Image: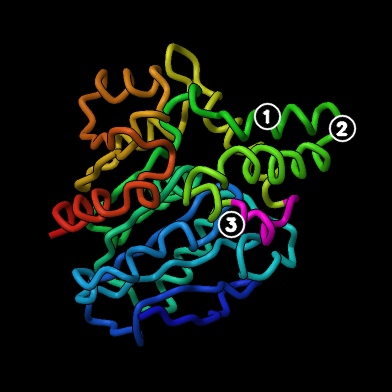
Amino acid sequence: MMKESFIKVDDGYIYMRRNRTFIPYKKTLLFIHGLGESGLCFKEVLEDERFNKYNILIPDLIGYGRSSDSRSGDYSFASHVKMMFSLIDTLSLNEIFLVGHSMGGDITTLLCSRDLNRKVKKYINIEGDITQHDLFVSSKAVEADGNNCFPEWFESYKNETIFNKYAQKYASGKRLFASLWFCRPDAFLENAYELVERNTKLEGEYKSEIGKLYCDIKIPKVFCYGSESLSEGSGKYLEDNNLKFKKFTGVGHFPMIDKAKDFYNFVDSFIS
């Protein structure tokens, strides 16, 4: 059964979906969504009785979904990570299984790299950026802003690309379209710029700072992706660095929605 709450954290209120009254001594599954999304992308886990033994926390990032705007106007990854650590401290979380999707994978990689108290015990990254090769949407947003047409691009992305192309075919498209209506365009754009900057800044074949940080994370971790989505370059990066991965065949960027049963079967086996 889904419950809802707003939690005051730093300079905003985080809206959060959860499965019950929070029980501090229980292990916690913490989910972080991606660019333009909201916690709606993980709602299937709240319907799966296998996970009732955990606290399930699915926040909307500040500037997204039903969370408040940032009074400081700061939607940076550093601000998102700070908010998540404040949430962890506010709720006294001590044993966390962390799941991040897309941009949420970048943010959770940063969170893991800064988790000095080692509260995160296992980490599932769903198509977060690990190379420069998967910046499909964020690079287009940055390009549109450079051409002084980001507002028009954002509306076209929401209504033409997502609603007309994807929402008619996929459950994930319907859910992303719904989330985009509540996403602040300035949060979307600021995060698109940071996605591009962080994942193109290094020298050499692989340019992603996030990818390097992901490789350095020492806790048990796995990279999940859809066979119809991940670039060849990122697939090669996984192999070159001997990174554990799980491929979901016949599905795109949202395996946790479009192949929910298989995805949550895997989550259950990985964290058990």
The relative height of residue 227 versus residue 186 in the rendered view (above or below) is: above
User: How many other residues sit within 10 Å of disc 3, few (<14), some (14-19) or many (≥20)?
Assistant: some
Badge 1 element: helix
Q: Is residue 63 left or right of residue 257?
A: right
Rendered image: mark on residue 140:
1
**Disc 2 to disc 3, how far (Cα)?**
26 Å
| Rendered residue at 65%/54% (across/down) | 180
Looking at the rendered structure, the number of numbered marks drawn on it comes to 3
- The answer to if 179 sits in the magenta stretch is yes
Residue behind mark 2:
148
Q: Which of disc 2 and disc 1 is earlier in sequence? A: 1
- Percent across and percent down for residue 259 are 32, 47
Instruction: Identify whether 102 is placed above or below 184.
Output: above
Vertically, is 87 above or below 195? below
The answer to whether the residue labelled 3 contacts the one labelled 1, judged by CB atoms less than 8 Å apart, is no
Is residue 132 or residue 88 the one in the foreground?
132
Q: Which range of residues does the magenta coloring cover? A: 177-186
